[in-house]
Amino acid sequence: MKLTEGRRREYMANPKNTAAVKELTARFQNASSAILTEYRGLSVTEMTELRKELGAEVEYSVAKNTMIKLAAREAGVEGLDEELLNGPTAIAFINGEAVDAAKAMKKFGADHDAFVVKGGTMDGSALTAEQIQQLADMDNRETTLSKIAGGFNGVLANVASLLGAPHSEMARLAAALEEKK
């Protein structure tokens, strides 16, 4: 079919690509966050090593930029611009703690110069590579809760000693009076 000015050629979507976009859309919708990376220069062995370090709560796979863009739009994810979706892209869909995944990627990136974090999404909004770096530098949920619990323990111990002070003072006074007799 020859294209003439003013007419657009109609394309039928490839069923394989349509299924891939549908799967990516579901992953975006089900994941708490996602991190986009460039994997150029990494071997299959290194990619497997990264997947192991990320753990069971992270699905890490290679996808075409066009499909990622379409799936993100369909899932209601805002801000994945052309700069993020440039070059070979792999995406980590995180079903657990984003901090843990960001820490694992930071550690992996320190050992593998070819690995680059491009950016990502959290709760439907785009994140820059710098924001993911900040996420990696944060304490994970368990550590934060431990710190909060430790703080409460300290406060409760102080309250208990303050509340117990009059009673212990009274007991010492009674003991001193008993000794005097």
Image (tube, rainbow, N blue to C red):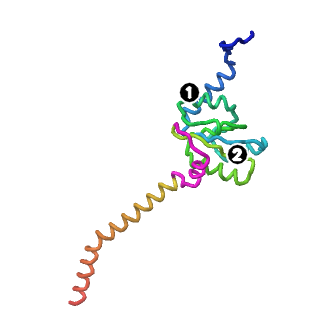
Q: In the drawing, what numbered circle is on residue 50?
A: 2
Question: Which amino acid lies under the numbered mark 2 shown in the image of this protein?
Answer: Leu
Q: In the drawing, what numbered circle is on residue 123?
A: none
| Quadrant housing the C terminus | bottom left
Foreground residue among 37 and 159:
37
Question: Which amino acid lies under the numbered mark 1 shown in the image of this protein?
Answer: Glu
Q: Whole-Å distance between the Cαs marked 2 and 1?
A: 28 Å
Q: What residue lies at 67% left-to-right and 32% top-to-bottom?
A: 65
Residue 132 in the magenta stretch? The answer is yes
Tell me if residue 57 can be seen: no
Q: Give the residue furthest to the bottom.
A: 180
Q: Can you give x and y, in whole percent of width and height, for residue 92 in the image?
A: 64, 40
Mark found first going from the N terminus, 2 or 1? 2
Residue 144, relative to residue 14: is it above or below?
below
Q: Nearer the viewer, mark 2 or mark 1?
A: 1
Q: Give the residue furthest to the front.
A: 5
Q: What residue lies at 54% left-to-right and 35% top-to-bottom?
A: 78
Residue range highlighted in magenta: 124-141
Q: Can you give x and y, in whole percent of width and height, for residue 166 in the image?
A: 25, 74
Q: In the structure shown, which secondary structural element does the residue marked by tag 2 occupy?
A: helix
| Quadrant housing the N terminus | top right
Q: Dot 2 surroundings within 10 Å: few (below 14), some, or many (20 or more)?
A: some
In the rendered image, which residue does mark 1 sit on?
74
What is the count of numbered marks?
A: 2
Q: What residue lies at 55% left-to-right and 29% top-to-bottom?
A: 75
Foreground residue among 10 and 38:
10
Q: Can you give x and y, in whole percent of width and height, for residue 104 in the image?
A: 64, 50
Residue 171, relative to residue 4: is it above or below?
below
Q: Is residue 124 left or right of residue 154?
A: right
Q: Can you give x and y, in whole percent of width and height, for residue 47 in the image?
A: 73, 43
Residue 94 in the magenta stretch? The answer is no
Q: Is residue 168 left or right of residue 22?
A: left
